[in-house]
Amino acid sequence: MIWLIVKKELTELVRTAKVGWLLAGMAALLGLALYNGYAYATTHSQLLRESQETTYQQFISQGDKNPHLGAHFGFYAYKPTADLALVDNGLEDYTGNSFYLEPHRRGIVRFKEVSDATGLRSFGFLNVGYFAQFLLPLFIFLLTHGIFAKEWENGTIKLLLSARVRPGQLVLGKLLACGLVVLVLVGGLVLGSLGLLAPAGAGAGGWGRVLPAYGCYVAGLLLYALLLTVLGATVSLLTRSSALALVGLVGFWLLGVFLVPRLASELARRVHPAITSVAFDDQTFRDMQYGVGDEGTKDERRERLAQRTLAQYHVKRLEDLPVFFIPLTIEDAEESDGRVMDRAYRTIEANEASQSRLVLASAALSPFLAFRGFSLHLTATDLNTHNDFAQRAEDHRRRIGEVVDAFYQHHTVAGNDFWRTVPQFAYTAPGLPWRLANAAAPLAVLLGWLALSLGLLGWAARRLH
Amino acid sequence: MTFSLFRLLLNQELKLLSRNRILATLFSLILVVLLAALWVGSSQLHQQQRTIGQIGAHGRTEADSLARRIRRIEAAGMRYPGFIWDDPTYAYNTARNEGPQYAVKQPFALQALAAGQRDLQPYYYKVYITKKQMLVHEGEIDNSFLQFIGQFDVAFVVIYLLPLLIIVFTYNVLSSEKEQGTWVLLKTSNQSLAGLMLGRIGIRYALFTGFFWLVVGPGLALLVGPGFLATANWWWLVGFVSLYFAFWFALALLVNSLSLSSNLNALTLLASWLVLGLLLPNLLQIGLNQAYPIPSRISLTTAERNAVNRYFERDGQTLTKAVFSSPRALIRQASVVTPGMVYGYGVIVYKSQEIKDQAARVAEQQLVQQIERQQAALRQLQFLSPALLLQEVLSALAGTHWHQYNQFSRDVDVFRTQTQRFFYPKMASEQTFRTFTVADAAAIPRFQPRPYASYAWLPMSRLLLGYAALVAGLGLVGYRRLLSASR
């Protein structure tokens, strides 16, 4: 019986011109999203790969210089484009990707592409992630808003219920029919993206590098599509008016996609206000200059270091030391300043994590936001991955400082032979277990929404009796 | 339409709307959302003003401290007890430490309505002679995830949310009459049906727009002060937003005139909203990025670094050798920092900065030109989507458009050059190495802040008239269709 209902619904849907146009429109948009995402990922990953090589080549061929002056010439650590950025580029354009590796100060990641974009950027960036988060729900709601309501509007509900079909079978049959149409679109999305991932799969690391994360993304996407289909059908069943169901569902979409996240983000800014750049600079400068706790001022620390070093080498004047003293002071300052900057950045990151948690909590009102969070974590285009990159780049910056200062203790001029001994930077985003751990909270919210929708559907179906 | 009929219609509409619970709920929701947006916008404006106040106080403290320190050194016969790199009588030290001044873009009151690029572009820079500000500064410290989600402001409520309410408000003005069977009754009256429909939609437009301005005008005046009412920006803004609402009402009239069911009317209007508000801007973005790809800022740094490397292959080597080999510099050791060393580093740094700036200028021009091409193309195409047009216009009127931030950045460039011209000769003086005086500290160039709210690049009158013509055209077509449908 269920399959009879599925067949009948599918025939009706296929014969409705509206659904045909809708599917064609969505397919065209999906094609565009795939192309746009692919173009973005290939252009960016090539630029960043080449730039990483170029900046290092510039560094190791800078010629004879004072080692510290040469270290200031430095080079950049670029965050490579995520493997799954063609699916969802997430925060990539908002975080920046360039970290300057030079002595004295912890770098910050710069060059947010979004600051050079036109106002069009605020309307979103059409790729697979955008398609799945913004357009797919709308498609599902347009498809499902009338699936039950039409039976009341056409007066066929009594006919249906007076036949041998049980309400549960009717609900399941209609749901399956809608689910199959949704699956066609989601299938196109999944296979299209997989096809575009082929070059990455054929590259270093093979499919093993991209497939597990992509597989999890697809599982989450299917869960999301199922949840939305159930939700759309439930509203249609409850309102019994397709116009009302449509307005309600689209209103929910609008609130969930735009209003709730934006309101939550403003609330997060109020509850966990960020420090201003001026205050940050002031505070870190003060801490570095005058010291934290009982560590003393910079001058006092330098004097203590001088006395320690003189005692260590049993000499009375800095000029008599067997090593140059300036690199020792640089390294000492790197350590104490590094502690100040680490503490300051940890505070910022903790504050941002609190803000993000608050926004995610609002996903209790918006399943769209929960899926967005899930997608960002799985594709490694989230804030956590960005912070991980920044920390690795900072570690590398300090390693370079150590290498250069060790050399500078004995030489006042460094040539290309030395510069070539400074290691190049390379970054790989953390693996699947880390990403899944980050994605657990949004996934739990999605599952909660699914349970709620199924519960509502069951309740509405029981009312049919 | 006679006045008495108009009054009758108005009374009827007011009764209908007040008894519609869904609409009343939606209206209340929008009222709350609008007030929240006004509060968020104004508190961000106040936050910026507070930060600018802090910057001013910081600048005064730094200036006082610098003068005090120099005076103390002069009084002690030029003896400085601290670390030589902190001695402010070396021009190079002051140029790095207390010398850099803040350049500030003052916020404009209407910024409380449209955030534009406020969260992405810096509204203040610390201007260094050795660092190009567009390469070292981002905006304020902000969570990228929150930036990615987007801002909650009145512009967002107007562009995205209110059209949906207008759709709910108007999608079944005619179809509900048909579905409830009152259409035939209306047809038998001696009034023009098209006139009645136009009147009903017109009244709803007036009520809706009036309600909006009644909330926004006094609300904003209360939160940020009434000064904005005297600016042309505000009155242009009133015109464009009112026209935007008129566009959606006119479109609803047209869709109603197609004599479809309520469901199809709602579907058509929602599809229009989706296409005009979301898809078209996205497609334009793809097209413009293809036509005018914007080079990455990475190319700027690559160009700078290549130039520095080229410089150090020849002239730079000669200069470095000359400075380092000078017996006064005593630089061929690395145990004690000598005055000559501070001077020598300063000279090398400013020479290479000149080379870097020259190289970056070319790459920067390419970047900015390409962005300007995109912006120019956008100006030509913004008419395709009323949502896009309104967003561009609102951010321009609020002083948060890319053009205004770009102008600020250019002014900062000029200011940086002034600062370099002030410090470089002092850094290059070999006489004593320590040339910076109290008089010099007082003469450090300062940036003159201003709000940047000019919108000269937008032909406002032409845009408004063109837009009004489009709305009138939509309304006219709808009206004519209704005329023929009621015959």
Image (spheres, coloured by chain):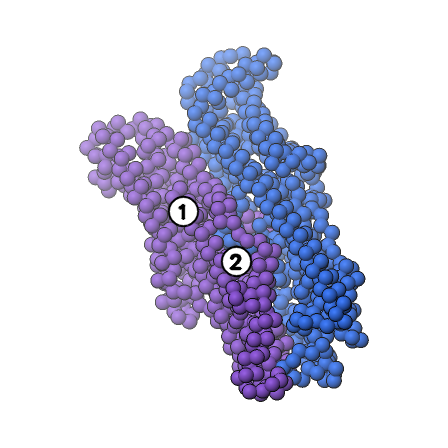
Chain colours: A purple, B blue
Q: Quarter holding the N terminus of chain A?
A: top left
Q: Position of residue B13 (x, y in %)?
A: 51, 20
Task: State the mark number for residue A95.
Answer: 2
Callout 1, which amino acid?
Answer: Ala
Q: Residue furthest left?
A: A164
State the residue at coordinates (50%, 28%): B170
User: Label 2 neighbourhood size at 10 Å, few (<14), some (14-19), many (20+)?
Assistant: many
Task: Let me know if residue B138 appears in the view.
Answer: no
Q: Quarter holding the C terminus of chain A?
A: top left
State the residue at coordinates (32%, 37%): A234
Q: From the viewer's perspective, is residue A308 above or below residue A255? A: below
Mark 2 chain: A
Residue carrying label 1: A361
Q: Secondary structure at mark 1?
A: helix
Q: Secondary structure at mark 2?
A: helix
Whether residue A403 sits left or right of residue B127 in the image: it is: left
Mark 1 chain: A
Q: From the viewer's perspective, is residue A405 above or below residue B297? A: below
Viewer-nearest residue: A80 or A290: A290
Callout 2, which amino acid?
Answer: Thr
Lower sequence index among marks 2 and 1: 2
Q: Position of residue B38 (x, y in %)?
A: 56, 37
State the residue at coordinates (45%, 52%): A354
Q: Quadrant of residue B97?
A: bottom right
Whether residue A148 sits left or right of residue A139 in the image: it is: left
Q: From the viewer's perspective, is residue B26 above or below residue B487? A: below
State the residue at coordinates (39%, 40%): A141
Q: Are marks 2 and 1 on the same chain?
A: yes
Viewer-nearest residue: B431 or B445: B431
Q: Position of residue B227 (x, y in %)?
A: 68, 36
